[in-house]
Amino acid sequence: MLLFAFQTLTSGWFLIVCLLAAAALTFLLYRKAVKFQKPWNYVLPTLRFIGLFFLFILLLSPFVVLQLQREDKPTLLVYLDHSASAISQTREVYAQGLDKPLSALKEKYNVRVFHFADKVYLPGDTILGRYATDLGIIAEHANEYRDARRVSAVLVVSDGIQNRGISPLVKPFVSNPLLYCIGIGDTTPQTDIRIAGIQVNESVFLGSEYTLEVQLRFDAPAAVAYNLQLQEGGRVLQSQAGNFEKGSTYRRIVFNLKAASPGLKQYRVVVSPVAGEKNLANNQATAVTEVVDDRKNIVVVQAAAHPDVGAIKRLLEGNARYSVNLADPGLMPNPDAADLFIVHGMPVNESQAGWLKRLSDAGKPFLHVSTLQTRRGLLGALPGGASPPASMQSEEVLPQPSADFTEITFEPEVIRRIRSFPPLKAAFGRWQSDATQKVFLKQRIGNIETAYPLYYFREINNHRTVWLCGEGFWRWKLKEFAVHGDALASESLLFQSLQYLSLKARPRSFVLKSIKNDYEAGESAVLQATYLDAAGKKENSAACELLLEGENGYRQLFPMVAYNDVYRLETAGLPAGQYKATSKLNKNPKLTASAVFYVNPMVTEISRTQADHAVLRQWAAKYNGYFAGSDKTKDLVNEMEKQEAAKPIIFSETKVTELIHAKWFFFIIIVCFAGEWILRKYLGSY
């Protein structure tokens, strides 16, 4: 429906003035004009009158208001559960009780049908994530529908079992539609003991201790005993036994493990079946974690035996992320012998000064501790070395944290403890500092705070070093243990410094990684390869391929596609088992990288067979809808027909246009004046 309105900014009485003015001017022109033959003596004055009248109307600043109204049928979105646990029953319910009624509803609704599992699919699409169900994705899809404001009703057919995403009860529909739910599946409680989930870190460091947590669920009318085993490679590592009372019970069981060797660790958790249990597919589950040997190899080099070296070594040995070796006093290992070095007391001679220079030239990061035996002149001559005073005298200096230090964030408790640390022995005199020094601790002599550096970080030409300008670190650790019973501040200072030094290790130029260590059967495995050029920038212009090999005999070569600034491969349908992926990049020379992942035979979707209609009832009630079982689809369809949501939706659109901008109006004026002039010429009047 189109509604038209003509309005002006002035009083409507001025239209009469325009009408009279146009009539008067027309009369003045044609009152003494030659009389034309009929009908021209009427046509010419009429054209002149209309042209003048429309021209005068423009002086009133008129505008046109157009209002377009149309009626559209409301939209009904139908979502059918096609996950592995529901697809057969969904098809049966749709074929027997929904197909024809939905066709009849098309007179009142625009009906759109979708399938869903891990996400929403169009009919005919291949459902890759059939072994997962996300009910919350329905609200997201409805809200992003191309005309979400017309969505007045939503129909969901599902068993209510959800194992991915968040609850649909917390995801709102934007259009606030009426929600109808049809529950399928068997809600009868069954005797079942199942592994509801396993939690373990995706990766752990070699030598560290970690836990594997099992969530065990039991539903039965009688109490039972159970035995839970943790296995690796067919060998039982640990087992725990217990009892469940009757009813529905949930229990968390924790296994304590230690990462003894690097690599991918596949753990199988098996719980013994109970009497009357039919579904045994959920009595076992597999979890995978990767033990990463990411330890940094540290060599402690000392000019002479010193208590500081023993204190540092003991702290390092208590941290699984570091492998520490102690060089004999005076010996200088090859710069390639470690990832980073801790240098204590050097140099005391030219040979040691030369070794330190080779260490710097090789780009090896190191932490340097100055002692009273350190040759001051040789130390100051090193690239980026400390600049101690030339005096051979010493004095005791206290640590004073600097408020301007931002390189590393230390906990407030660490800062508080450092302020109470005992003094170190340092060279007496003025210590030089420059802009490259990121000073964390300054020297405080008695109650006098100085600008002299005591503990600072330095980076020159991508080479990082840390400097402690005094000896007596062992006193700091001893004081902490005496007062607090631990060495929190000493450990934090040492390990944060080593982390700072480790970060500059050059990254591998080509790396392949699986986004997960283990996947469920039927889930898509995603692998991503990253190449860094000489400048450390990601680049993916060269061809890349991936060879995927499984312990079950699977072997397939895939091309990896350029995705953003990396290479990516997504493949589904892999049989259960462990896989090794080897990626080759067509560079000169060719680069290779590998990754390992595992496909879990345990499928979460079929581990739970009891339908959950309670969530469907709550969901429908939240949106004033209706819930029905699969045997009462007719009642639900009748309810949908009675609802006012089936009424047409009226959309109204208003458009305001100034008449002076309307081309059609100018066209009428031009036609009138031009037509009059042409006809007058044709009829012989001038």
Image (tube, rainbow, N blue to C red):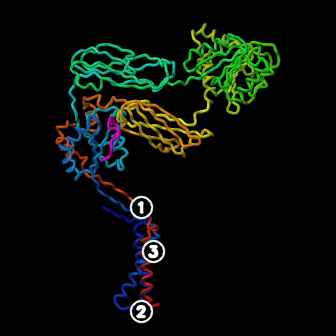
Q: Residue at x 44, y 91 (%)?
A: 685
Q: Quadrant of residue 603?
A: top left
Please give the range of residues in magenta: 124-137
Q: Is residue 247 visible?
A: yes
* Residue of label 1: 656
Residue 562, given in percent of the width and then of the height, sits at 50, 45
* Residue of label 2: 34
Q: Residue at x 33, y 44 (%)?
A: 126
Q: Is residue 130 magenta?
A: yes
Image vertical order of residue 156 relative to residue 389, above or below: below
Q: Amino acid at mark 2?
A: Val
What is the CA distance from the residue labelled 1 to the residue labelled 3? 20 Å
Among numbered discs 1 and 2, the one appearing first in the sequence: 2
Q: Amino acid at mark 1?
A: Val
* Residue of label 3: 55
Disc 3 to disc 2: CB gap under 8 Å: no
Where disc 3 sits, the SS reads helix
Label 1 neighbour load within 10 Å: few <14, some 14-19, many 20+: few
Q: Quadrant of residue 235?
A: top left
Disc 1 to disc 2: CB gap under 8 Å: no
